[in-house]
Image (cartoon, grey):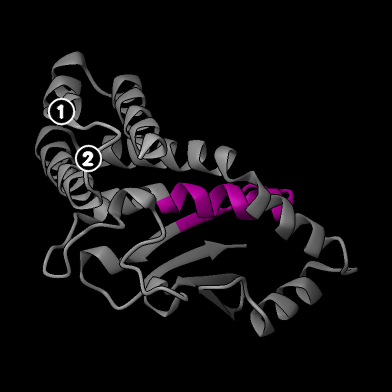
Amino acid sequence: MGRALEMIKSIEGSVSQFADEDAKRKVMKGADALTAKSSKADVAMWVKGAMERLDALVDEETRVKIMENCGYACANVNKRVIEGAKVRRRKFKSVDEFLEAEQRKPMRGTKLIREGNVLYQFYTPATFAKSLRCYCGLLRGLPVDEQVSKTYCNCSKGFVKKLWESVLEKPVKVDLIQSAVSGAKECKFAIHL
């Protein structure tokens, strides 16, 4: 649970960076009650509430920046996923060959579909060895009947952006199309190559 508290601190830091102190105080309400002994459900429900407060307090552009920034931090913590993809990329002469191979054998829990200059990446957490609602540890305890604002999934959008920019060695635009924790069967991102 210590890692979850670090991730919550990352949310707080991102809110501080892009919003005012009043918004930070309101979004983070109740975070101080979470401890290393808090249940996964308590953490997930706090995140759900924090995203609802964030949605009510700041405009969409700012919310996206806040959560994408959390995704960039997550990418730094989970850099072995990105490093593994970079190693796989170096085995191929061209990006096209690499993307074809990735589509045939994507990373576990994902699938890729390329349509022209757009690569669609799907996260399918329900098909993981242990069915999940989300890969993020903060939402592992989200009750089945609960949904979280799509705002939260801009964190994954930030992670996906860092992953593909690192692998392709160029800037990419990423769109969040749908999210498993906000009602879809799987998460879907469009990576503009």
Which of the 4 image quadrants contains residue 93? bottom right
Instruction: Report the residue at 26% width, 74% height from top.
Output: 184
**Residue tagged by mark 2?**
38
Residue type for callout 1: Ala
Instruction: Report the residue at 35% width, 66% height from top.
Output: 177
Give above or below for 144 relative to 78: below
**Residue tagged by mark 1?**
33
Q: Position of residue 64 (x, y in %)?
A: 32, 42
Span highlighted in magenta in the image: 156-174
Q: Position of residue 122 (x, y in %)?
A: 46, 72
Tell me the distance, in whole angstroms, between the alpha carbons under discs 1 and 2.
Answer: 9 Å
Q: Is residue 130 magenta?
A: no
Instruction: Report the residue at 23% width, 42% height from top.
Output: 60
Which of the 4 image quadrants contains residue 153? bottom left
Question: Does 73 sit left or right of 149 as displayed?
Answer: right
User: CB of mark 1 within 8 Å of CB of mark 2?
Assistant: yes
Q: Position of residue 154 (x, y in %)?
A: 36, 50
Residue type for callout 2: Ser
Q: Is residue 173 magenta?
A: yes
Name the residue at the front extreme: 37
Give above or below for 89 relative to 102: above
Q: Quadrant of the N terminus?
A: top left
Q: Position of residue 73 (x, y in %)?
A: 50, 36
Q: Which mark is residue 25?
A: none
Mark 2 crowdedness (10 Å alpha carbons): few <14, some 14-19, many ≥20: some
Give above or below for 56 relative to 185: above
SS category of the residue bearing label 2: loop
Give above or below for 151 relative to 115: above
